Image: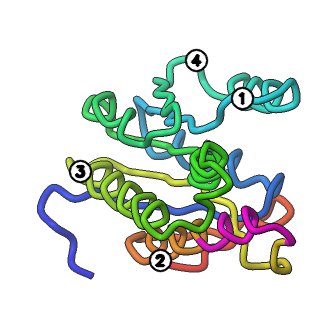
Amino acid sequence: MERKEGAALSLIVVTGGVRSGKSRFAEELAAQAGSPVLYVATGQVWDEEMKQRIERHRARRPRDWGLAETNGTLSAALPQMERYPVVLLDCLSTWISTRLMSVPEASWRDEAISRALMDEAEQWLDAACSGGRTVIAVTSEVGLGGVAMTKLGRWFADVLGDVNQLAARRADTVYAVLAGIPWRIKG
C-alpha cells in the first residue's frame, strides 16, 4: 500500500487479550514516539469495577498528555487530534462494545448498524492518519477463543474482527501482546 501525501508517519496497531499488557505497551510506544500525546479514551463508567479500571489507566499516563473522551463516537476526538503529533486510541474493542450495548435487542445483528460501525472506524482511521502524525490503536483480539454463547457476543466478535482486520491492513506495524510480551507480527 502506498503512503498518501500527508499520511501518518506510522499507524501502529496493538492487539492482544484482555489484561495482556497491550495498553501499557501502547503507552510506552506513544511515549517513545514523541510529545505531545493525545490519549483517545473510549471507556465509559458503567459500574464500580469499570470506574476503577479507568482510574488505573489514568494514573499510569503522564500528566502532560492530552485527553479526548469519545463518549461512544470516535469522531468526537477528531477536533483535538489536529494539535497532536502522536495519538493513542485505547481501545477499539471498548468503543465497539459500548456502541453495541446501546442497541436494543431487537436490532442485534442489524447489518446497517454493523456497516455504520465499520464506516465510522474507517473514517476515523482516515482522519487520524492524515496530517503526518503517529497513530497507535489498541484493540482486543477476539479470534483466539470459542464462539460466544450469546447473540450479542457473536455480533461483537464479528464486528470487532472486521474492524481489527481493517486497522491491521492499514497499519505499518502490528504487535500482538501475550502475557505482557509484545510480538511484532507486521512491519
Name which residue lies at 63% across and 48% down.
104
Name which residue lies at 44% across and 32% down.
38
Going from N to C along the chain, the mark reached first, 3 or 1, is 1
Q: Which residue is mark 3?
A: 132
Of the residues shown, which amino acid type is indicated by label 4?
Arg
Of the residues shown, which amino acid type is indicated by label 3?
Gly
Going from N to C along the chain, the mark reached first, 2 or 1, is 1
Distance Cα–Cα, label 3 vs label 1: 26 Å
Graded by Cα atoms within 10 Å as few (under 14), some (14 to 19) or many (20 or more), the crowding at tag 4 reads few
Please tell me which residue lies in front, 5 or 110. 110
Distance Cα–Cα, label 2 vs label 3: 18 Å
Magenta region: 149-158
Name which residue lies at 38% across and 54% down.
120
Graded by Cα atoms within 10 Å as few (under 14), some (14 to 19) or many (20 or more), the crowding at tag 1 reads few
| Mark number, residue 118 | none
Please tell me which residue lies in front, 45 or 149. 149
Q: Pointers 3 and 1 in contact (CB under 8 A)?
A: no
Q: Is residue 43 magenta?
A: no
| Mark number, residue 63 | 4
Q: Secondary structure at mark 3?
A: loop
Going from N to C along the chain, the mark reached first, 2 or 3, is 3
Please tell me which residue lies in front, 65 or 69. 69
Q: Which residue is mark 2?
A: 187
Distance Cα–Cα, label 4 vs label 1: 9 Å
Distance Cα–Cα, label 3 vs label 4: 24 Å
Residue 46 in picture, x, y percent from top left: 76, 30
Q: Is residue 133 left or right of residue 33?
A: left
Please tell me which residue lies in front, 161 or 13. 161
Of the residues shown, which amino acid type is indicated by label 1?
Arg
Residue 109 in picture, x, y percent from top left: 59, 68
Q: Secondary structure at mark 4?
A: loop
